[in-house]
Image (cartoon, helix red, strand yellow):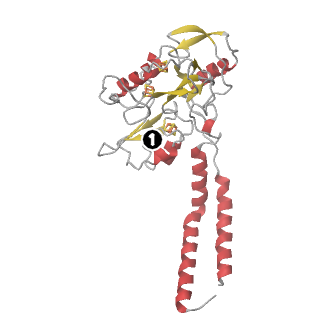
Amino acid sequence: MKRRDFLKASLGGTAALLGSGAAEARGNLEPAEDAIGMLFDATLCIGCKACVSKCKEVNGMPPVAMGDETQYDAARDLSPQTLNVIKVYTEGEGLHKDQTVDGFAFEKRSCMHCVDPGCVSVCPVTALRRHPKTGIVTYDADACIGCRTCMVGCPYNVPQFDYRNPFGEIHKCQMCNQAGVERVDKGMITGCAEVCPTGATLFGSRKALLEEARQRMTLTAGELYNYPRGDVRSPDSHHEKAAPSYQQHIWGEREAGGTNVMHVSAIAFDKLGMPPLGERSYASISETVQHTLYSYLALPAVALAGLTFVVRRNTRDDEGGDS
Ligand code: SF4
Ligand code: SF4
Ligand code: SF4
């Protein structure tokens, strides 16, 4: 076979295989049947960090020290010791809450409990799982092999690997529902939502939280609104407050396939450090590519064709021949 013909045949066959494999593209997963989540309203957050402390208490995690100061938690970002952190955005003089000119705002970082989680999709040993009914994404340390692929598969940089643990371990929020905690299974709400004094972190079903968020989008700035605390459907209490000028954007309604933890804000999310994401989930993109490449053993066929070509060429070159 001539080199040109060989290449043509290999590439033609590969293209046909990839073309037929592309029919297997999968879309985003739908939210779980009884999806549970949280709504974080940045305009209600006063930066008290009660949610950060409660999260540490629930998960038995130590405070992060700053210098010699060990009495107060000084966590600035997610880490193996911090599953939930409140970050501060400032602009100019940083004087006015929820304003872009000389303003400031608070933003929460924790696992978003994605509807179609990238971490679950890439984990080779299903150490990360999405609960089929609640959509909560949990982690099984016993199954984990410490490969850290989940850290790459997460669009929010959430999974944190504990390098100081000789057995390695990933840490992330499991919606207070991991083995030994199981607050949600016991009918309790998440620790962070329970202690939040303003309802900035609100617990509930994804559907109810989405309804609540959409309701807030209809408010005009200054309009009085009765904000619930705790559980969106059976709140511990309400408090009346003038609505801010909300961004018409519910983060997590659609981003990367949607999330069960959603955010609303008066400041654009890119300023609050949220990543630029399309509507397609990372999982659906990567699984489509994998399935396409592996369909009908396309990848081994490509590899074999390439290797065969290189061997043939080298053999001919050694023999001083040409084709
Ligand atoms: S935010 Fe990251 S760690 Fe959490 S479920 Fe989504 S992909 Fe997984
Ligand atoms: S749901 Fe539980 S683990 Fe997750 S951030 Fe809140 S308190 Fe922490
Ligand atoms: S407890 Fe509520 S108000 Fe306080 S920092 Fe957390 S989210 Fe903000």
Quadrant of the image occupied by residue 23: bottom right
Q: Nearer the viewer, residue 277 or 94?
A: 94
Few, some or many residues within 10 Å of mark 1 (<14, 14–19, 20+): many
* Residue projecting furthest to the front: 93
Q: Is residue 76 left or right of residue 10?
A: left
Above or below — where is 301 with respect to 185? Answer: below
Please, what secondary structure does the residue beneath circle 1 have? Answer: strand
Q: Quadrant of the C terminus?
A: bottom right
Quadrant of the image occupied by residue 1: bottom right
Q: Is mark 1 within 8 Å of ligand 1?
A: yes
The structure residue drawn at horizontal position 55% and vertical position 13%, both measured from the top left corner, is 228
Q: Amino acid at mark 1?
A: Leu
**Can the viewer see residue 109 in this picture?**
yes
Quadrant of the image occupied by residue 225: top right
The structure residue drawn at horizontal position 64% and vertical position 73%, both measured from the top left corner, is 10
- Could you say where residue 80 lies in the image, as x and y percent from the top left? 38, 36
Q: Nearer the viewer, residue 202 or 273?
A: 273
The structure residue drawn at horizontal position 52% and vertical position 35%, both measured from the top left corner, is 132
- Mark count: 1
The structure residue drawn at horizontal position 55% and vertical position 26%, both measured from the top left corner, is 90
**Can the viewer see residue 190 in this picture?**
no
Q: Which residue is mark 1?
A: 128
Above or below — where is 53 with respect to 29? Answer: above
Q: Is residue 237 left or right of residue 213?
A: left
- Could you say where residue 25 lies in the image, as x and y percent from the top left? 65, 50
Q: Nearer the viewer, residue 226 or 127?
A: 226
Above or below — where is 6 with respect to 208? Answer: below
- Could you say where residue 185 lies in the image, as x and y percent from the top left? 43, 25
Above or below — where is 74 with respect to 305? Answer: above
